[in-house]
Protein backbone atom coordinates (compact mmCIF):
# COMPACT_ATOMS: atom_id res chain seq x y z
CA UNK A 1 0.00 0.00 0.00
CA UNK A 2 1.29 3.44 -0.88
CA UNK A 3 1.50 6.56 1.24
CA UNK A 4 -2.11 7.84 1.64
CA UNK A 5 -3.26 10.83 -0.38
CA UNK A 6 -4.83 13.31 2.06
CA UNK A 7 -6.42 16.69 1.66
CA UNK A 8 -8.88 19.18 3.03
CA UNK A 9 -10.99 22.19 2.23
CA UNK A 10 -9.90 25.77 2.84
CA UNK A 11 -11.57 26.03 6.28
CA UNK A 12 -10.57 22.48 7.36
CA UNK A 13 -14.13 21.35 8.10
CA UNK A 14 -13.87 18.52 5.54
CA UNK A 15 -10.93 16.13 5.11
CA UNK A 16 -10.41 13.17 2.80
CA UNK A 17 -8.02 10.28 2.37
CA UNK A 18 -7.28 7.76 -0.35
CA UNK A 19 -5.21 4.72 0.62
CA UNK A 20 -4.54 3.15 -2.77
CA UNK A 21 -2.30 4.07 -5.65
CA UNK A 22 -3.89 6.50 -8.11
CA UNK A 23 -5.28 5.09 -11.34
CA UNK A 24 -4.30 8.29 -13.17
CA UNK A 25 -3.16 11.87 -12.69
CA UNK A 26 -4.29 14.36 -15.31
CA UNK A 27 -5.31 17.89 -16.14
CA UNK A 28 -8.82 18.29 -17.50
CA UNK A 29 -9.45 21.31 -19.73
CA UNK A 30 -13.16 20.66 -20.37
CA UNK A 31 -15.35 23.73 -20.09
CA UNK A 32 -17.21 22.26 -17.09
CA UNK A 33 -13.95 21.83 -15.13
CA UNK A 34 -12.92 25.36 -16.07
CA UNK A 35 -16.17 26.81 -14.79
CA UNK A 36 -16.33 24.64 -11.67
CA UNK A 37 -12.75 25.44 -10.65
CA UNK A 38 -12.60 29.03 -11.90
CA UNK A 39 -9.37 28.10 -13.64
CA UNK A 40 -8.05 27.12 -17.05
CA UNK A 41 -7.75 23.43 -16.24
CA UNK A 42 -8.38 21.18 -13.28
CA UNK A 43 -5.59 18.91 -11.97
CA UNK A 44 -7.24 15.61 -11.04
CA UNK A 45 -6.14 12.42 -9.31
CA UNK A 46 -8.28 9.39 -10.15
CA UNK A 47 -8.62 6.87 -7.29
CA UNK A 48 -10.77 3.84 -6.57
CA UNK A 49 -14.00 4.50 -4.69
CA UNK A 50 -13.13 1.62 -2.36
CA UNK A 51 -9.87 3.39 -1.36
CA UNK A 52 -11.50 6.78 -0.68
CA UNK A 53 -13.07 8.14 2.52
CA UNK A 54 -13.96 11.58 3.83
CA UNK A 55 -14.95 13.23 7.12
CA UNK A 56 -17.15 16.26 7.36
CA UNK A 57 -20.17 17.68 5.64
CA UNK A 58 -20.26 18.07 1.86
CA UNK A 59 -22.67 19.55 -0.61
CA UNK A 60 -23.04 18.19 -4.11
CA UNK A 61 -23.91 19.54 -7.53
CA UNK A 62 -24.66 17.26 -10.49
CA UNK A 63 -24.73 18.10 -14.19
CA UNK A 64 -23.97 16.39 -17.48
CA UNK A 65 -20.22 16.61 -18.13
CA UNK A 66 -17.90 16.18 -21.08
CA UNK A 67 -18.56 12.43 -21.09
CA UNK A 68 -22.23 13.08 -21.88
CA UNK A 69 -23.09 11.49 -18.52
CA UNK A 70 -23.87 13.17 -15.19
CA UNK A 71 -20.96 14.08 -12.95
CA UNK A 72 -21.33 15.06 -9.31
CA UNK A 73 -18.94 17.62 -7.85
CA UNK A 74 -18.60 17.74 -4.08
CA UNK A 75 -17.66 20.84 -2.12
CA UNK A 76 -17.49 22.18 1.42
CA UNK A 77 -20.73 23.98 2.38
CA UNK A 78 -18.81 26.29 4.73
CA UNK A 79 -15.94 27.64 2.57
CA UNK A 80 -17.02 26.47 -0.91
CA UNK A 81 -13.83 24.52 -1.71
CA UNK A 82 -14.32 22.12 -4.63
CA UNK A 83 -12.94 18.80 -3.33
CA UNK A 84 -13.76 15.72 -5.38
CA UNK A 85 -16.01 14.37 -8.09
CA UNK A 86 -17.98 11.21 -8.64
CA UNK A 87 -18.57 10.63 -12.36
CA UNK A 88 -21.71 8.59 -12.98
CA UNK A 89 -20.20 6.90 -16.07
CA UNK A 90 -17.55 5.32 -13.80
CA UNK A 91 -18.99 4.70 -10.31
CA UNK A 92 -15.85 2.79 -9.33
CA UNK A 93 -13.73 5.98 -9.27
CA UNK A 94 -13.46 9.27 -7.41
CA UNK A 95 -11.70 12.27 -8.92
CA UNK A 96 -9.76 14.23 -6.28
CA UNK A 97 -9.06 17.85 -7.18
CA UNK A 98 -5.31 18.13 -6.63
CA UNK A 99 -5.33 21.73 -5.41
CA UNK A 100 -6.87 20.49 -2.15
CA UNK A 101 -4.11 17.96 -1.40
CA UNK A 102 -2.16 18.36 1.84
CA UNK A 103 0.97 17.79 -0.26
CA UNK A 104 0.25 19.06 -3.79
CA UNK A 105 3.88 18.39 -4.78
CA UNK A 106 2.91 14.71 -5.10
CA UNK A 107 0.73 15.52 -8.12
CA UNK A 108 2.39 14.58 -11.40
CA UNK A 109 0.19 14.90 -14.48
CA UNK A 110 0.49 11.98 -16.88
CA UNK A 111 -1.71 13.54 -19.57
CA UNK A 112 -4.17 16.34 -20.32
CA UNK A 113 -7.64 15.90 -21.78
CA UNK A 114 -10.17 18.09 -23.61
CA UNK A 115 -7.29 20.03 -25.15
CA UNK A 116 -9.73 21.28 -27.80
CA UNK A 117 -11.32 23.39 -25.02
CA UNK A 118 -8.03 24.67 -23.58
CA UNK A 119 -7.72 28.44 -23.88
CA UNK A 120 -5.52 31.46 -23.22
CA UNK A 121 -5.97 31.29 -19.42
CA UNK A 122 -3.68 28.26 -19.40
CA UNK A 123 -0.86 29.78 -21.43
CA UNK A 124 2.02 30.72 -19.15
CA UNK A 125 3.56 33.81 -20.66
CA UNK A 126 7.30 33.94 -19.84
CA UNK A 127 7.60 37.47 -21.26
CA UNK A 128 5.45 39.06 -18.52
CA UNK A 129 6.88 39.91 -15.08
CA UNK A 130 6.67 37.01 -12.65
CA UNK A 131 6.89 37.33 -8.87
CA UNK A 132 7.70 34.66 -6.29
CA UNK A 133 5.23 36.27 -3.90
CA UNK A 134 2.48 38.92 -4.21
CA UNK A 135 3.24 41.51 -6.87
CA UNK A 136 4.51 44.84 -5.47
Image (cartoon, rainbow, N blue to C red):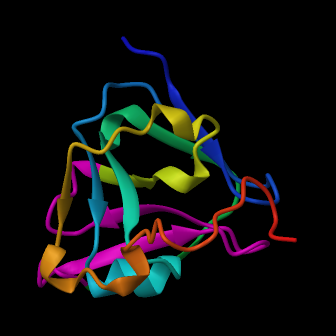
Residue 110 picture location, percent across and down:
21, 43
Residue at (69% x, 75% y) in the render: 80
Residue at (82% x, 59% y) in the render: 11
Q: Residue furthest front?
A: 127
**Magenta residue span:** 65-93
Along the line of sight, which residue is nearer the eye, 118 or 43? 118
Residue 83 picture location, percent across and down:
54, 60
Along the line of sight, which residue is nearer the eye, 50 or 35? 35
Up-down relation of residue 50 to residue 114 (above or below):
above
- Residue 84 in the magenta stretch? The answer is yes
Residue 74 picture location, percent across and down:
51, 68
Picture quadrant of residue 65: bottom left
Image quarter hosting the C terminus:
bottom right
Up-down relation of residue 105 to residue 68 (above or below):
above
Residue at (59% x, 69% y) in the render: 75
Q: From where the camera sits, is residue 17 visible?
A: no
- Residue 38 in the magenta stretch? The answer is no
Up-down relation of residue 69 to residue 136 (above or below):
below
Q: Residue furthest right?
A: 136
Does residue 10 appear to the left or right of 109 in the view shown? right
Q: From where the camera sits, is residue 83 visible?
A: yes
Q: How many marks?
A: 0
Does residue 133 appear to the left or right of 27 in the view shown? right
Residue at (16% x, 74% y) in the render: 114
Picture quadrant of residue 128: bottom right
Image quarter hosting the N terminus:
top left
Up-down relation of residue 73 to residue 47 (above or below):
below
Amino acid sequence: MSNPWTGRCLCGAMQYESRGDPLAQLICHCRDCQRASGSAGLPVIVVRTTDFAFKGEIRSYTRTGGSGMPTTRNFCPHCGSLLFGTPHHAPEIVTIYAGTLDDPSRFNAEFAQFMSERHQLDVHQPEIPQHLRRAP
